[in-house]
């Protein structure tokens, strides 16, 4: 079931009022929202409901056992079993074909490969389950009642494509009743409206205008067209994925839940480190807390730090898909992050890249929180605000980072390494003929506008949302309805699946 469809609209039109009607009856509400979430997930393929239920029961059993373990050794053994179970399930459904094909290539064999359908969102709910059992083992939380945990793992707004919400963030909200008049309706309307526009209009337009053709047949396009196609894909995947999570966060807000922010203007990042603080932030923090830190982080010397970065980013790439192209994408980012740290160390900057806060204001709070804005003040640790040399460094960092990220997207989008090679070759060997029919003023305007809008300070965006939230609810609803109608009118025919559904 896709968010921007009439099917989901009818589904949510029933779920929202019934959810608030039952909110004062916790057990009934949990049973209802669990049933609604299973209906949402099973709409695609009901057979995988058994997988979701099995993952729920198994991780609840592991969580209780880990919490009750008498010794540290037994707790670690149980945690290892829980991690092995979750990664085993993920491996069977997501990496089986990749492992068999790699095995055949290595040994020159021809083992049969059975077709196994990939359950939508398996990577997301597996990582949530892992964070649950790991946090119990670390003592960060205790095991939740089975019904609470089942709601957490299956909650439909974030079930199939995130954001990755941790149990410590979600379960306290299940136990707390939020009155309907405390719901941030205006904020939710803005998130859903902009999410639908980014997905249905921007992402779909860029895909059909240039991205699909240039990546499918790069040799039939000039280098300029391929370059613009690469730029357009960077915008497309941002609009597609951030659009989905905007809708997910907005839908959750309407149900009384607050999710963590997942994107923070990543196209304006000043370094790769800054990019990963802004892009798919819930995955970045998950990899940091549950993989990078356990490996030692940056505490065991420079060489170990570089090794850990490479391991984390390659595994992060493989999390996206079972293919060498995803591993290469992760490797590129790992090498880039290690190179940044090496350069920073050579400059004596202690791994601290220049950030926007160095020449602008320190913005307090997260966009998703809906809390009151804290007063801002200049960062006392930063260089002189707006110093010309700092501004030049900032913009140079933005330009270099954007192009590095765009080039890294090529193997990610190409689908395989031969396809990525063809795109790279055409990118550098087709500059003799710059005539084009694919590059239009509208296309360039969309790309430029999507980048420019991210240059608006987050503080201004929050103030605009706050102002919208103060107008009467009826006017908010009318504005949201007009925005959705405009998105539908401007969108190409049909709704393409979200890019991250495959992960």
Image: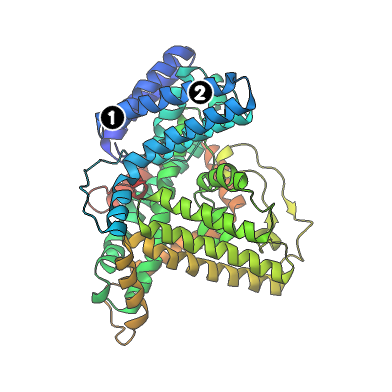
**Is residue 253 something that shows in the picture?**
no
Depicted 227 relative to depicted 41: above or below: below
In this image, 338 relative to 410: left or right?
right
Residue at 65% from the left image edge and 70% from the top image edge: 343
Q: Position of residue 243 (x, y in %)?
A: 41, 48
Residue at 64% from the left image edge and 74% from the top image edge: 392
Q: Nearer the viewer, residue 295 or 156?
A: 295
Q: Which residue is mark 1?
A: 42
What residue occupies the far bottom of the structure in this picture? 432
Q: Position of residue 316 (x, y in %)?
A: 47, 51
In this image, 87 relative to 11: left or right?
right
Q: Which residue is mark 2?
A: 180
Q: Position of residue 464 (x, y in %)?
A: 55, 47
Depicted 35 relative to depicted 462: above or below: above
Q: Quadrant of residue 383?
A: bottom right
What's the distance in space between the residues labelled 2 and 1, CA to CA? 28 Å
Which mark, by number, is residue 281?
none
Residues at badges 2 and 1 in contact (C-beta under 8 Å)?
Answer: no
What residue occupies the far right of the structure in this picture? 380
């Amino acid at each position: 079931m896709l968010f921007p469809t009439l099917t989901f609209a009818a589904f949510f039109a029933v779920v929202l009022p019934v959810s608030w009607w039952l909110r004062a009856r916790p057990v009934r509400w949990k049973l209802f929202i669990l049933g609604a979430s299973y209906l949402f997930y099973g709409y695609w393929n009901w057979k995988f409901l058994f997988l979701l239920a099995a993952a729920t029961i198994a991780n609840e059993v592991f969580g209780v056992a880990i919490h009750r373990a008498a010794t540290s050794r037994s707790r670690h053994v149980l945690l290892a079993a829980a991690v092995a179970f979750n990664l085993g399930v993920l491996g069977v459904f997501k990496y089986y074909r990749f492992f068999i094909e790699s095995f055949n290539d290595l040994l020159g064999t021809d083992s049969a490969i059975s077709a196994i359908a990939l359950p939508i969102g398996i990577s997301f709910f597996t990582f949530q389950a892992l964070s649950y059992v790991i946090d119990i083992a670390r003592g960060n939380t205790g095991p939740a009642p089975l019904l609470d945990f089942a709601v957490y793992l299956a909650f439909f707004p974030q079930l199939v494509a995130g954001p990755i919400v941790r149990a410590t963030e979600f379960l306290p909200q299940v136990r707390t009743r939020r009155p309907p008049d405390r719901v941030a309706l205006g904020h939710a309307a803005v998130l859903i409206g902009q999410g639908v526009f980014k997905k249905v209009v921007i992402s779909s337009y860029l895909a059909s205008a240039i991205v699909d053709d240039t990546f499918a047949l790069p040799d039939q396009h000039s280098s300029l067209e391929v370059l613009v196609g690469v730029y357009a894909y960077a915008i497309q995947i941002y609009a597609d994925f951030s659009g989905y999570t905007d809708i997910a966060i907005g839908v959750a807000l309407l149900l009384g839940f607050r999710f963590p922010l997942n994107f923070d203007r990543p196209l304006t990042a000043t370094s790769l480190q800054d990019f990963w603080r802004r892009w798919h932030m819930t995955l970045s923090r998950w990899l940091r807390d549950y993989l990078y830190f356990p490996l030692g982080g940056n505490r065991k010397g420079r060489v170990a730090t570089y090794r850990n970065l490479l391991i984390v980013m390659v595994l992060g790439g493989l999390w996206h898909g079972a293919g060498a192209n995803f591993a290469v994408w992760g490797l590129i980012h790992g090498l880039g992050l290690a190179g940044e740290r090496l350069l920073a160390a050579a400059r004596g900057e202690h791994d601290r890249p220049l950030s926007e806060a160095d020449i602008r204001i320190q913005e307090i709070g997260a966009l998703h929180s809906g809390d009151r804005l804290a007063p801002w003040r200049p960062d006392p640790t930063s260089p002189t605000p707006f110093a010309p040399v700092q501004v030049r460094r900032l913009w140079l960092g933005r330009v270099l980072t954007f192009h590095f990220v765009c080039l890294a997207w090529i193997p990610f989008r190409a689908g395989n390494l031969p396809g990525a090679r063809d795109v790279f070759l055409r990118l550098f060997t087709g500059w003799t003929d710059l005539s084009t029919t694919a590059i239009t003023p509208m296309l360039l305007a969309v790309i430029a506008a999507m980048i420019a809008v991210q240059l608006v300070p987050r503080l201004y965006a929050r103030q605009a949302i706050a102002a919208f939230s103060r107008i009467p609810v009826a006017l908010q609803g009318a504005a949201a309805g007009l925005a959705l109608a405009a998105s539908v009118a401007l969108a190409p025919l049909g709704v393409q699946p979200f890019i991250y559904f495959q992960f």
